[in-house]
Image (tube, rainbow, N blue to C red):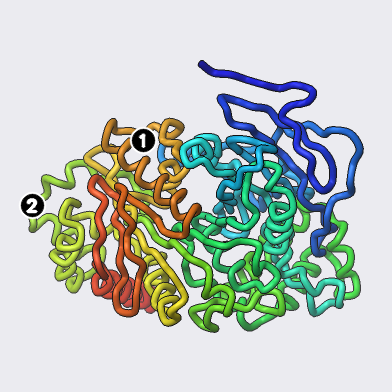
Amino acid sequence: MNTFVYREDYPVVQTTEGALRGYEWNGTCIFKGIKYADAERFMRPHRVAPWEGIRDAHSYGYVCPLMQQDQPTGELMVPHMYWSMDENCQYLNIWTPGINDDKKRPVMVWLHGGGFFAGSSIEQLAYEGENLSKAGDVVVVSLNHRLNVLGYLDLSCFGAEYEASANVGNLDLIAALEWVRDNIAAFGGDPDNVTIFGQSGGGTKVWTLMQMPEADGLFHKGIIESGVYDLSSDIEGDNGKKLVLAMLAELGLKEKDVDQLKTIPYSKLAEAYLKVAPGIAQKGGYVGNMPHKNQDYLGDPRKYGFTEHAKTIPLMIGTVLGEFDFRPAVSGKRSLSRAEVEEKVKEALGEEGIALIDQFREVYPDKAPLDLLSLDTIFRVPTIDFIKERVKTVESRTYSYQFTYEFPVYDGKVAWHCSEIPFVFHNIDKVPVCNRGRETEYLQENICNAWTSFARTGIPVVDGVEWPACTAGDEAVMMFDNICEVKHNPDHKLVRKLKKLQKNLLQENIQH
């Protein structure tokens, strides 16, 4: 029986700034739109002012403004929700099995995708935290933070007041984790057992936070879902001066007018950026929209190594088989002859690609041979390199996975970017394409339990069994599919050969 509770005295929690009242739905206490920080444009965040009385926390807070209008496509595979936008976007949401009960539940803080330039904590329907909280007896937190030019425009060369501007988006995340540290016990969570997890840009936020000393001690485990990719090299070198000067010129302003960027309407700021950034990027210049290496962020660990603290954080990391293959599913792909498959592979990858067909079938025997063309290298190869760097240190514990499920679209479509999220959140009921009876229910239970068991103990459990951590020379990969099983270095040679072919073909196309 569905139950709803909302009273003057319940559910009420006292935070460091004041009292908040949420509501209870089916045994889960829910608090939405909690303001965890305030900030002036381009400046570090700070704590919100205390208040008297009780504030209601029933509605999601503002999300960061988008630079471009999203197009509602692909909703069959990744259904979305959109919300009111405002720069004043430092809000978080909480789902918990109980409040003020002195229990110390694991805390799971979700960092949304969309790179560092788009997205929100409620953008995908599958982000809703009630079912995950209930299934794992965990406290789930999701949050919004500054993005794009608001969160990552490097103005540091224009004065000391802008010293943090290139990373204030990530500094918002740190402010949210500080709020969690100070307040989550009253929401039934353990401030000494916090796991940050995220997908795509959210996964990247996990490992960039691991490289930010100010975040040390604010979280204790990390889960990176399709979040390791090659950030543009400009974050390690060039600063934002050329970009900012071009934006000022586009706005009819001069260098001495740079302070006007603090007050100019966001729409004009975004329009100027979108006008000048492509040309600068084409010449290899800095265009922002990602963390910038400086005193706050110590850089990509594959290049600079992990910080001593980051080495101690248990990590779960993985990718999905198809990632950015959002093309329509191929009807009849399993009935193609060998010659027909070879012809299509040759057309896409050249003559050398034909040799990869049998390698693909050896690694993924239950997939159609043509699915070789869906195989991801954008995330998978950097993830292999990331793990290789992690296991150099004995104290680093790293667990690897691949999500390889084939969805019921036409004759089957391999897993795409974001497709594991409904299973993680125990929300396949919200995404119709994720439902195929017992096999998807089995997959949901295994994936959700792996995430929550890792959050609880630092060791993921699947089918009641712990899977082994990676070691030097051995990437033990949990394959999440109809059968969940561990394979060792299953695709290393395959994806590296595929990436090399793709790179060679790209260079040939550029030359021609």
Residue 336, x across and y down, in percent: 12, 49
**Residue at the image point whose x is 32% and y is 72% from the top:** 499
Q: Amino acid at mark 2?
A: Ser
Give the numbered dot on residue 337: 2
- Res. 504 image quadrant: bottom left
User: Of label 1 and label 2, which has the lower sequence position?
Assistant: 2
Alpha carbon distance from label 1 to label 2: 28 Å
| Residue 435 sits above or below residue 335 on the image | above
**Residue at the image point whose x is 15% and y is 60% from the top:** 361
Q: Is residue 265 left or right of residue 69?
A: right
Residue 108, x across and y down, in percent: 56, 50
Which residue is nearer to you in this view: 164 or 269? 164
- Res. 459 image quadrant: bottom left
| Residue 478 sits above or below residue 243 on the image | above
**Residue at the image point whose x is 35% and y is 70% from the top:** 470
Give the numbered dot on residue 433: 1
